[in-house]
Image (tube, helix red, strand yellow):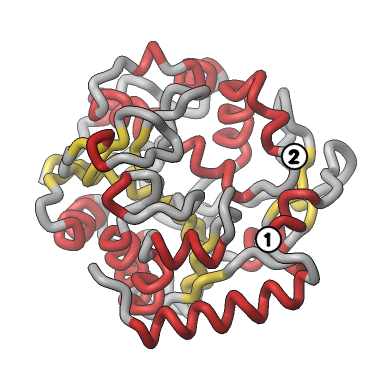
Amino acid sequence: MRPDRRSFLTLVARASAATVCLGGGYALLHERPVRRGGEGARLPDYRQGLDSPASAMAVSGAADPGSAVRRVVEAMGGMGRFVRPGERVLIKPNVGFDRPPSFGATTSPAVVLAVVRLCKEAGAREVMVADNPINNPLRCFAVSQIGTAVEQGGGTVMLPAASHMGPIAVAGEAIQTWEGLAGLLERADRLIGIPAVKDHNLAGLSATMKNWYGFLAGGRNSFHQKLDVVIADLAGAFVPTLVVVDGTRALVRNGPTGGRASDVVATEQIAAGTDQVALDAWAAELMGRRASDVPSIMEAERRGVGTSLWRTLNPVTT
């Protein structure tokens, strides 16, 4: 997918306006004072009120990513089972770095496009797509081509802004309260994750649970000494409506940033489900690794977030 120039210029204009409003650009969002205690926005169960199975899973081959996304979502009961007409949906892909899709450091724009379109078809009033990237947000959304994909699907890129920021109550072992995109999380009725499958030099794996890290703001590097605990904290705090895992290609080395196309393997798979631990175990196997070798998977399973034995969920294969 090549970026459309008109869409790209629209995204630039929005990003420029947001940067001016910030009075210091994206760096401010990473250097804000961090609230580590006290009150914060309580994250809801984004599946509340839905007739959706707590541990269903579907997997599909992804030679055509858009078709594969539709197949796995249909196998889960269709997007109408997860998104009701008039609801606001917040989608969280991995847009952390200003890398082109071929480097595997960000979610495939084709997968994002398919999920946005399914939400619109289900009658969503608003489809917001957000991340708080490590690199400049404008460049990340533009170079990854995710910004253009969102616009093509009828969604809205929500570049991080000071007005979105507030304390999020994580209530975990390593994090109690942390500054992040609380305003967007409070605005949303439904939350859908679209993580990429990739290597991580500290965590071992970046997929479903690690993806929530991108909702947090300043001082995130302080997590590095206990990253498996932090990832499990986030998995316990975020209860997504649905997760669609982008396994179209896996960054198997030099993650999470990548930098060489040779580090990427065309795995051509898409998985969907609601059990974050199971989805990460599936992602680990997709990369030729064992779930038991990924500390965050074992820690989240110990806490009862989900199961690493993903085959016991009897996933539908399409």
Q: Secondary structure at mark 2?
A: loop
Q: Position of residue 28 (x, y in %)?
A: 76, 57
Task: Judge by depth and name the residue closer to the eye, 147 or 122.
Answer: 147
Q: Is residue 12 left or right of residue 100?
A: right
Residue 54 vs 194, above or below: the answer is above
Residue 239 lies, in percent from the top left, at: 54, 44
Which residue is outermost to the front? Answer: 260
Residue at 37% from the left image edge and 73% from the top image edge: 148
Is 303 on the left or on the right of 56, as rendered?
right
Name the kind of residue labelled 1 in the image.
Tyr
Q: Which quarter of the figure has residue 16?
A: bottom right
Give, as a three-letter code, the residue at label 2: Gly
Q: Which residue is depicted at the point 31% across and 40% down?
A: 260
Residue carrying label 2: 219
Instruction: Report the residue marked by disc 1.
Output: 26
Residue 295, given in percent of the width and then of the height, sits at 49, 16
Can residue 241 be seen in this snapshot?
no
Q: Is residue 156 above or below residue 35?
A: below
> For mark 1, does the 10 Å Cα neighbourhood hold few (<14), some (14 to 19), or many (20 or more) residues?
many
Q: Quadrant of the N terminus?
A: bottom left
Mark 2: few/some/many CA within 10 Å (<14, 14-19, 20+): some
Is residue 18 in view? yes
Residue drawn at point x = 48 percent, y = 84 percent:
10
